[in-house]
Image: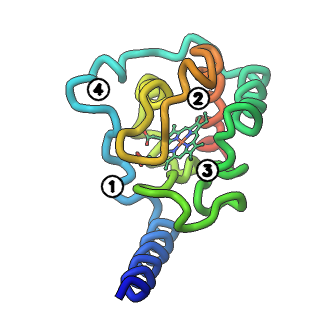
Amino acid sequence: MRTSRMVLSVAALSLQVLLTHAWGADPEVLRPRVPKDQIEAARAVVNPLPATPETIAQGKTLFEGKAFCRACHGPDGKGIFGKDIEPGSLKGPLPRNFTDKAWQARRTDGELFWILRNGSPGTAMGPFIPLVVTEEEAWQLILYVRSFGKAQ
Ligand code: HEC
């Protein structure tokens, strides 16, 4: 019973991964993560740092180093499609594909900053400011996350 349920959920997960990969972001991925009563304020927050080769490189160093984002989001920002992550090892929604332009367009920098401060409730994405990164480092990370959407 347990095993068959597990097999079923693994099958459902693989299907979800396949579909998401084939057709880009599903509506669940695009759904805002910031709670309704805070989203307007969160969206209005602007990244104080310019996107330069230097700030993006600082973000990359953090992403791959002390902030360990890479462990879940993959070296290529594709999350489960990256090489580092075991499918099924995370609870809740999977890390999204940062190269997905539809997802990139749907979020403001301020929303991503809110997520880095508060985490995405109910998922494996935890809060990183201020314990792991400073606010300035979070903005560098966001510039790097944005750079995945600009490739190709
Ligand atoms: C333990 C695994 C894990 C780690 C480590 C992690 N993330 Fe996440 N992240 C996730 C998951 C899972 C989601 C998807 C959450 C959801 O669907 O709401 C996510 C979502 C996000 C989102 C998108 C939220 C949205 O609005 O759609 C951003 C941006 C993000 N992570 C950035 C980072 C950065 C930057 C780091 C490093 C400081 C990091 N993550 C570290 C698992 C992780």
C-alpha gap between disc 2 and disc 4: 17 Å
Question: Of the numbered discs in the image, which one, if any, rests on residue 39?
Answer: 4
Q: What is the secondary structure assignment of the residue under circle 3? A: helix
Where is residue 135 shown, x and y percent of the image? 57, 15
Q: What is the secondary structure assignment of the residue under circle 1? A: helix
Question: Of the numbered discs in the image, which one, if any, rests on residue 142?
Answer: 2
Q: Which residue sits at x=78%, y=31%?
A: 61
Q: Nearer the viewer, mark 3 or mark 1?
A: 3
Q: Mark 1 or 4 closer to N-term?
A: 1
| Residue farthest to the top, as pictured | 48
What amino acid type should be assigned to the residue bearing mark 2? Ile
C-alpha gap between disc 1 and disc 4: 17 Å
Q: Which residue sits at x=58%, y=50%?
A: 99
Instruction: Decide: few, some or many residues near mark 1? Use Cα within 10 Å; few <14, some 14-19, many ≥20.
Output: few
Are discs 1 and 2 less than 8 Å apart at CB? no
Q: Mark 2 or 4 closer to N-term?
A: 4
C-alpha gap between disc 3 and disc 2: 16 Å
C-alpha gap between disc 3 and disc 1: 19 Å
Where is residue 12 shown, x and y percent of the image? 40, 77
Asked if ligand 1 lies within 8 A of label 1, the reply is yes
Asked if ligand 1 lies within 8 A of label 2, the reply is yes
**Residue beneath disc 3:** 72
Q: What is the secondary structure assignment of the residue under circle 2? A: helix
Q: Nearer the viewer, mark 4 or mark 3?
A: 3
C-alpha gap between disc 4 and disc 3: 25 Å
| Residue farthest to the front, as pictured | 2
Q: In the image shown, does 58 or 54 lie closer to the viewer? A: 58
Q: Which residue sits at x=59%, y=21%?
A: 139
Q: In which quarter of the image is the N terminus?
A: bottom left
**Residue beneath disc 1:** 28
